[in-house]
Image (tube, rainbow, N blue to C red):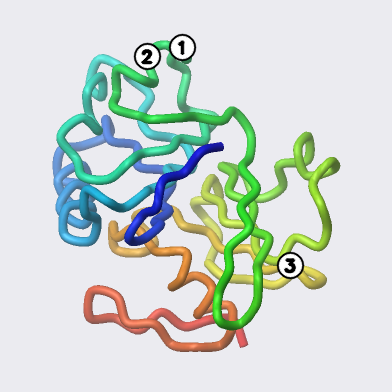
Amino acid sequence: MKVSNPTKVFVTSDLHLDRDEIRKEQIISGWKERISESDIIFVLGDVCDNLKKCKHIFNNLPGEIFLVKGNHDHFSNGHIFDMGVSQYETDAILLYVSHPYRTFRIILSHKPFPMRRIRNMPKPINIVVHGHNHRQRKLVRKVNNTFYVNVITDKWDYWPLTLDEIIRIVNGEKVLINGKHLINIT
């Protein structure tokens, strides 16, 4: 996957933009407040159920958008580009992220266990950033030596998170977003 030199890299999931207007407005407001044109945002699935309501949804939003399709994204691959998405993946993306702490192997996927792709990926995986689990109470958890971070938009007050914020959270730091402390699992 070719990625330009962004100012920041963001992730979010489970937008469900066709569910109600208030939700849609909150998501778009948080997006516009945090994301600039030079940023990249990975949307980890479940953009909308009804393509007619979301056809050009990302065209007027800042940032370069990459999509990992979710279980509610039943539109054809051709329609993805009409929505304003630059690139997409059907299962998972592996990123190597250099950070002052170390280089992290991060999987971005809609579901927390993208088994088809993870088998062939280099180990260890340090962080899995995902959505899908709406009822999950702990948004950050550690299983064996891998952190799982659930970035469902409504659980984070409709604000996308940066990869830097996620790394800082799993390293035990408190991160302030929208006036609230996000606390890791330790």
Quadrant of the drawing holding the C terminus: bottom right
Q: Secondary structure at mark 3?
A: strand
Q: Which residue is mark 2?
A: 79
Q: Is residue 12 above or below residue 176?
A: above
Rendered location of residue 24, percent (x, y): 20, 42
Residue at 24% over, 55% down: 35
Whether residue 168 sits left or right of residue 25 in the image: it is right
Per the image, the residue denoted by label 3 is: 146
> Residue 85, relative to residue 126: is it above or below?
above
Mark 3 crowd level (few <14, some 14–19, many ≥20, 10 Å Cα):
some
Q: Of callouts 1 and 3, which one flags the residue occurring earlier in the amino acid sequence?
A: 1
Spatial CA span between label 1 and label 3:
33 Å
Badge 1: residue crowd in 10 Å (few <14, some 14–19, many ≥20): few
Within 10 angstroms of label 2, few (less than 14), some, or many (20 or more) residues? few
Tell me whether circle 2 and circle 1 mark residues in contact (CB < 8 Å). yes
**Residue 69 spot, x, y in % from top left:** 51, 30
Residue 81, image quadrant: top left
Query: Which quadrant of the rendered structure holds the N terminus?
Result: top right
Side of 186 relative to 162 (left or right): right
**Residue where numbered disc 1 is placed:** 76
Going by the numbered disc 1, the residue's amino acid type is Ser
Asked if marks 1 and 3 touch (Cβ < 8 Å), the reply is: no
Secondary structure beneath dot 1 equals loop
Q: Amino acid at mark 3?
A: Thr
